Image (spheres, helix red, strand yellow):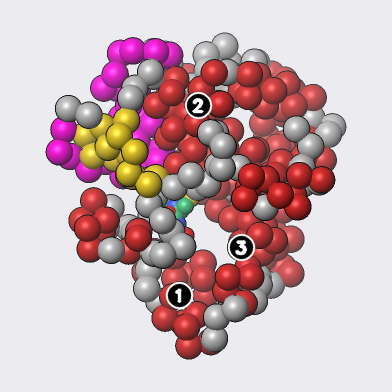
Amino acid sequence: MALELFHNDASTCSQKVRICLAEKDVEWVNRHVDLGSQENLTPDYLAINPNGVVPAFVHDGTPIIESTVMCEYVDEVYETGTKLTPDDSKKRAEMRAWLRYIDEVPSMAVRVPTFQNLLIDRFKAMSEAEYEEFRDSNTLRRDFFMRLNRTGFSDQEYENSLLQLRATVERMEAALAKEGPWIVGEQFTIADICMAPLFQRMEDLGMSEMWENAPQVADWFAAIRARPSYDIAYYAGTKMTDLFPQLRETAQG
Ligand SMILES: N[C@@H](CCC(=O)N[C@@H](CS)C(=O)NCC(=O)O)C(=O)O
C-alpha cells in the first residue's frame, strides 16, 4: 500500500524525510499540511501525530512519526535505493549518536534564527491575547513560543543558538577530517540526511560564513547537494530563499 506523507514544503524535518524517500526510490502520496492555518492541530492530523508537528507518514494503515525514526523505518522496510544504515554495530551506534545529537542540538538551535529573523512578523501582528491562544494551542511547542515571547528571543538565547550551530560545524569538521567523506566515514547514512536540511537552512539565513574555514564541511555540503535526492526533496518553493526572496542576496550557495 502507498505511503502517505504528511509534511510541509519548508519544514526542515519534512525535508529530511523527503531526501530519505528519494534516496530509497520510494514513491509517496502527497498530504501537504498547512502550518499557517494550524492544520497540524486538527483532530484528523492529531490522530496521526499526537505531537501536532510535521512530518508523519501512514504506511499500510500505521502512522509513523518523528522524522529521524521515519528515516530509520524507511531504510529498514525498503530494500530499494541507497542503503543508509551501516551493517557494523559500532558504526551504527556512531550514526545513532549523531542522530541524537542532531535532534537535540542543531535542530533546536536553527529554529531560533529562523523564527527570529524570518517568521516573527506573523507573531508581532498578533495581539497578546491572540498570541497566548496560539502559544497554548500546542503543548509540545508551548515552551518554545513562551521563549519567543511574541516579539523575539532574549539576546542570550539567540547568541546561544549561534554558539550551538558553530559547535555543530566544528564537530562535523573534526569528524569529516578524521574519516569522511560522510559523517560516519565511507558510507552515506541517515546522519548525513538528517544534518543536510540544517545546513540548507543556515545558508538561507546567510550563515554560510560559519563553514568558511571548515573545508571538509563545505565539501560535504557540496556533495550532499550534488546527489539527485536533493533536488527531488527541494522542489521549487521549499527553501526559505524561495519564500523570502530578500534572502537571496546574503545566502551564498
Ligand atoms: N521531533 C520532531 C519535530 C517536528 C517539528 O518540530 N516540526 C515542525 C516543523 S520543522 C512543526 O511541525 N512545527 C509546527 C508549528 O510550527 O506549529 C520531528 O523530528 O519530527
Q: CA distance from mark 2 to mark 1?
A: 33 Å
The residue that label 3 is drawn on is 119
Asked if residue 63 lies left or right of residue 124, the reply is: left
> Within the magenta stretch, is there residue 41?
no
Residue type pointed to by label 2: Ile
| Label 2 CB sits under 8 Å from any ligand 1 atom | no
Seen at 37% across and 69% down, the residue is: 139
Q: Is residue 248 above or below residue 220?
A: below
241 relative position to 67: left or right:
right
Q: Quadrant of the C terminus?
A: top right
Secondary structure at numbered mark 1: helix
Residue type at tag 1: Arg
Residue 232 circle label: 2
Q: Is residue 97 visible?
A: no
The residue under label 3 is which amino acid type?
A: Leu
Residue underneath mark 1 = 135
Magenta stretch in the rendered image: 60-85
Q: On the rendered structure, is 123 left or right of 248?
A: left
Image quarter (top left, top right, bottom left or bottom right) of the N terminus: top left
